Image (tube, coloured by chain):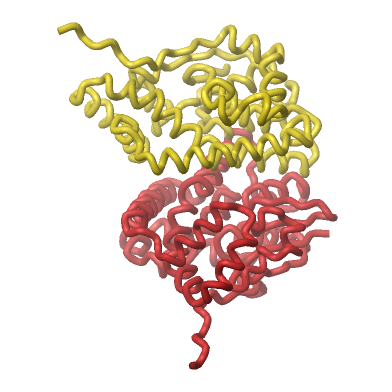
Chain colours: A yellow, B red
Amino acid sequence: MLTLYSFGPAANSLKPLLALYERGLEFTPRFLNPAVFEHHEDWFKRINPRGQVPALDHDGRIITESTVICEYLEDAFPDAPRLRPTDPYDIAQMRVWTKWVDEYFCWCVSTIGWERVIGPMARSIGDDEFEEKMKRIPIPEQATKWRNARKGFPKDLLDEEMRKVRVSIARLEARLAESPWLAGTDYTLADICNFAIANGMDKGFPDVVNAADTPHLIDWLTRINDRPAVREMFRKSQRESLAPRPKASA
Amino acid sequence: MLTLYSFGPAANSLKPLLALYERGLEFTPRFLNPAVFEHHEDWFKRINPRGQVPALDHDGRIITESTVICEYLEDAFPDAPRLRPTDPYDIAQMRVWTKWVDEYFCWCVSTIGWERVIGPMARSIGDDEFEEKMKRIPIPEQATKWRNARKGFPKDLLDEEMRKVRVSIARLEARLAESPWLAGTDYTLADICNFAIANGMDKGFPDVVNAADTPHLIDWLTRINDRPAVREMFRKSQRESLAPRPKASA
């Protein structure tokens, strides 16, 4: 039996959701609510001591890290439709792209997202409650990121991250101008893992991702969003709200 | 035919060197000299346009990224002694460790290494020659790192990286206190990829890695260094010098 613990269908949580639907694997989705710090609650830290989603429970064994989970599903269910090539060279090309998104692309996009969404949400929480939540975060860097988001990230850091966003988008556009899919002729985990970060950037970063400047990237986003498994996944998956809490009336 | 382009047996170059020797795969080593920026020369950028080692040439097809190369060798040569488990869960545990070293552990150790070794070397080069070398670097972040190393990294950055080194070493020590090898009962790519960064830290970071504070880590380093394949690899592999250039006499 498979249970996936994740946030809603975006960012790293989107990767295994896409892989599970695309491959037609039955699973129980368990959506956690980041707005109430559910992933730092004790019940979930017993599942993943690092307090991070996604996490996959397969017959009681826990697999963590979104990209590792996607490859695990290939290893554990080799008879379902594959999202990993079979030729060793093609697998390596796929992994260059899944590694790049984890080491570079996801971080710059994440910082901007934290500044825009997590910052206001964190500022809407009172000091005492916020500090209480921070104490439950097992990874020191994660607590630091929450504190920085609440203060607002420094402008020079945000500028540097935006530069990296532009470098990333240019790299994706150049690759998609020469190939229909990132790792070659087939839709693979390279596409899924990069789509998980790039999806919606035409709305969130319209000056960087748009039909005039990045036509191949826009076409790739559209083709993926149009896939039956992707449409079904978005229709069935629960989205959370990260809006700031309403102020208590005086 | 296999040709490995790499620096000497340390850091990311050490990973595929260890995997190739351990698995008894015949290959031609081609050691590049970072002190003369050989990896940014045109002949090598035709092999890897990103100007980074290691890179593996397998019958004319180029595979890049050290961890990807190690997994490629498993996929392409399944009959040689394995360094990747066969059980999907065990493979996932291995990948959590190879991913962590690439995303966290290697970067903090690298910054300290650049400050200590690359900085003095870069300062021993004249301004004009240095700028000429910078122009050939295809990855902007790499050129920035060279410039920062030449200036000297800011103290608060070095302090933060040293904090991460301590976090990393504590994580390795805790794991090795409960398991002989990082991914479980067998020596795998998890050990190879982390050893590539941790080897020599008892000399470079003696206040963090030492027999009193990290006995299990020290024992693990010793066990790996004592492996016949590892001894043979170090004996046969060429080391480069990154010493500052001697000053021209006046």
Query: Where does residue B124 sit, x and y in percent of width and height?
Result: 49, 77
Q: Give A104 or A59, whichever is nearer the viewer.
A: A104
Q: Which of the pair A196/B211 is nearer the observer?
A: A196
Q: Residue at x 56, y 76 (%)?
A: B241
Residue drawn at x 50%, y 58% is B145
Number of residue marks: 0
| Any part of residue A32 in sight | yes
Quarter of the image for the C terminus of chain A: give it: top left
Q: In the image, is residue A97 above or below residue A136?
A: below
Q: Is residue B90 visible?
A: no
Q: Quadrant of residue A203?
A: top right
Q: Nearer the viewer, residue B185 or A33?
A: A33
Residue B92 in which image quadrant? top right
- Quadrant for the N terminus of chain A, please: top right
| Residue A25 spot, x, y in % from top left | 65, 16
The percent coordinates of residue A204 (x first, y second) are 52, 23
Q: Position of residue B35 (x, y in %)?
A: 59, 72
Q: Is residue B9 left or right of residue A6?
A: right
Residue at (42%, 38%) from the top-left corner?
Answer: A158
Q: Residue at x 52, y 14 (%)?
A: A29
